[in-house]
Amino acid sequence: MPDAAPYPFEPSPARGRVLVFDSGVGGLTVAGEIRALGPRLTVHYAADTGFFPYGDKSDEALRERLPKVARALVDAVRPDVFVIACNTASTLALAEVRAALSIPVVGTVPAIKPAARLTETGTIGLLATPGTIRRAYTARLIEEFAAGKRVILHGSLELVKLAEAHARGEDIPPEAFAAAQAPLFNAEGGDEIDTIVLACTHFPLVRGQLIATAPRPVSYIDSGAAIARQTIRVLPENTQSGGQGGTSLLTRPPDETDGITRVLRRYGFPDVQFVACEPNATTSADAAP
């Protein structure tokens, strides 16, 4: 398992069962933050590998699928809290998932508010998936928390694929990471960016590569630590836990996925199980451009 980064807060004594959910392996960054803050929690992980990636799916397909998948996964492990470690899913269907479950649901919000506090030039880059970029929810966050700031947005599915490949241990040339973030710096006003929001949970997996290939020093921030703190806050009282857990759930049989089982084991989730979910009537052919 990769070494965990130092955590800037005192660990919580909270106990309970947490299920962290994403379309792929990006949510492992959030699971790591939750484990660091709550070492006594039982943390499980779920990836909707049967519908990955979310960033190129239509809004209608995701709204139809997400509540069904959430119910199936929660039924499988019975957590106390369900964490949607995915900006695309959270900005689109957080309310629908909450309505489908009877336990607290924590969503993922792009770290626009802390970025607005951190920037000194007043120009922020937002690196996300195309789905998160086009959401009205994202626009409202910018309007509410970054009023008076310039926010330059770029949606990259390529960076999601690079992050997944990196997590599998593939050797990715630095030029690929430079190209994936270049549109931010090349945009009008991009030469003033000093802070970049990583608004996809996959992207912190390659934070080091982004830092190394940026044309100049900038700060990269994400919402992982904030999600961990919120998870602790919403835990029901009198929950119990047996430790770190380790069960991981996939919506496609593990032998049909591209190396994800190996990645999950590297990150401390050795028990990989398949959970069948009702398929969408909308297929990938109906994905939004």
Image (spheres, rainbow, N blue to C red):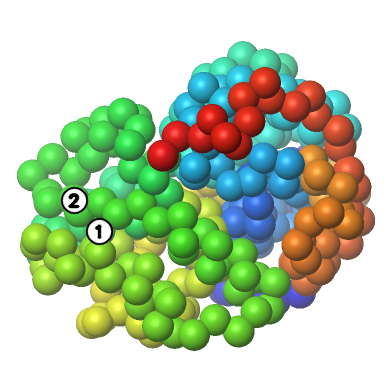
> As displayed, is residue 235 above or below residue 249?
above
Q: Where residue 132 sits: x, y (%)?
A: 40, 41
Q: Where residue 153 sits: x, y (%)?
A: 26, 51
Q: Are marks 2 and 1 in contact (CB under 8 Å)?
A: yes
The answer to whether residue 89 shows anywhere in this view is no
Q: Which mark is residue 234?
A: none
> As displayed, is residue 126 above or below residue 262?
above
Dividing the picture into quarters, in which one does residue 175 lie?
bottom left
Q: CA distance from mark 2 to mark 1?
A: 6 Å
Q: Which mark is residue 151?
A: 2
The answer to whether residue 171 shows anywhere in this view is yes
Q: Earlier in the sequence, mark 2 or mark 1?
A: 1
At 15% from the left and 62% from the top, the residue drawn is 187
Q: Is residue 167 left or right of residue 161?
A: right
Viewer-closest of 96 and 160:
160
At 30% from the left and 47% from the top, the residue drawn is 112
Q: Residue furthest front?
A: 285
Residue underneath mark 1:
125
Alpha-carbon neighbours of circle 1 within 10 Å: few (<14), some, or many (≥20)? many
